[in-house]
Amino acid sequence: MTTFRKTLLASAAVLAVGLASAPVQASTFASSILDISNFRLLHSGGAAYSTSDFTILQGTNDAHATASLNGVFAAGASSIPILTGTPNVAHQCVGGGCPVLGNNNFNPFPSPPPVPGSFGYADQDLSGAAIVINGNPAGAHARTRADASTATNAIASGNSDVGTSTTFAFTLGASDTMQIAFDAKPYTQVYVSPGSGPDANANARLSWSINIINLSTGTSVFTYAPGALNADSVLSRTDGSPGILTYAPAFAAFGGLTPLLVAGTTYQITIQHNTLANTLQQELPEPDSVAVLAVGLLAMSAALRRRKS
């Protein structure tokens, strides 16, 4: 009987301490994907601009993909002249739970999100061109994604862009307007599990804009930043408001028209295309019911000690 009491006392104490300190399994997840297709720069008559329409045409296609987890980064970048080619940065991931995604996989995770581990992820791809180059039809296809997931105490993020973006200077041979036309499919999703720790959060957003400035005066002559690819896409969840939010409208057509661009004047176009996701997770102790159980076990062990004395 004495041996049994000693064993019970020890087991009760160990179990009570273990249960009281055991963490809740909690998760945070964020994802953002932006698919821009058939992006073209068109004359007032609807035909695509080509290299022959410019007396000056120079610039670069820039791209970046950066992932991070707890201050550890994985990053790739590329910068290619616009008349030479387009960048395709390899996907980047850091963390023990990196998802098995092939390069240039821009499909969302199944919903609800799997939260497979703690990782930051980013990818980017750009193909085609906004104008006719070397006889190839106009139509650029730009895709970016960023994902962040935490299944334990961690800070994770993904960040990808294609350009800050494509930037080039041009001078037209004849005055004309410039129509911007493209299709876009935006996607953002955030998730915080019930019972996540204090300050746990998940955030996702998209950012897309085009700006044309007069390089002689430094003034902006045209800006286009549709809300569907910017403010409308911003999602956030916290421990105080857990659950899942998803922004996933269907492919839609977008477009804008510049004022008259004067021949002989040099302009610069900057197309900014960015996806961002970040998450923070902190573990919580088990709920009050477990704490009550722990207290009960400790009380039982104390009673046994009193009986023995």
Image (tube, rainbow, N blue to C red):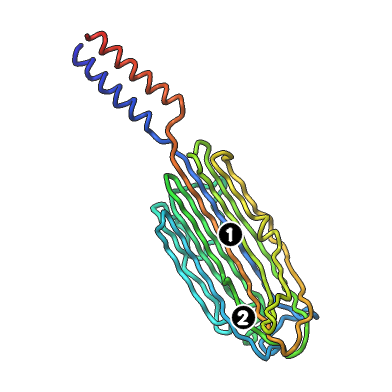
Residue 25 appears in which quarter of the rendering? top left
Say which quarter of the image contains residue 6.
Answer: top left
Q: Amino acid at mark 2?
A: Phe
- Picture coordinates of residue 17 (x, y %)? 33, 28
Query: Which residue is under mark 2?
Result: 168
- Locate residue 31, reporting x and y percent: 55, 54
Tell me if residue 305 comes above or below residue 262 in the rendering: above
Q: Indicate the secondary structure of the residue bearing disc 2.
A: strand
* Residue at the spot 78% in from the left edge and 78% down from the top edge: 46
Query: Residue shown at 72%/80% (left/top)?
Result: 48
Find residue 76 and report its image quarter. Answer: bottom left
Q: Position of residue 300 (x, y in %)?
A: 33, 15
Residue at 30% in and 12% down:
303
In the rendered view, would you say 231 is above or below 254?
A: above
Q: Is residue 245 above or below residue 158?
A: above
Residue 28 lies, with reference to residue 4, above or below; the image says: below
From the image, which quarter does the N terminus lie in? top left
Q: Toward the viewer: 177 or 246?
A: 177
Q: Amino acid at mark 1?
A: Ile
Question: Does residue 116 appear left or right of residue 184 in this picture?
Answer: left
Q: CA distance from mark 1 to mark 2?
A: 25 Å
Q: Position of residue 227 (x, y in %)?
A: 70, 59
Residue 151 is left or right of residue 179, and the answer is left
* Viewer-side label of 1, 2: 2
Question: Circle 1 sits on which residue?
Answer: 33
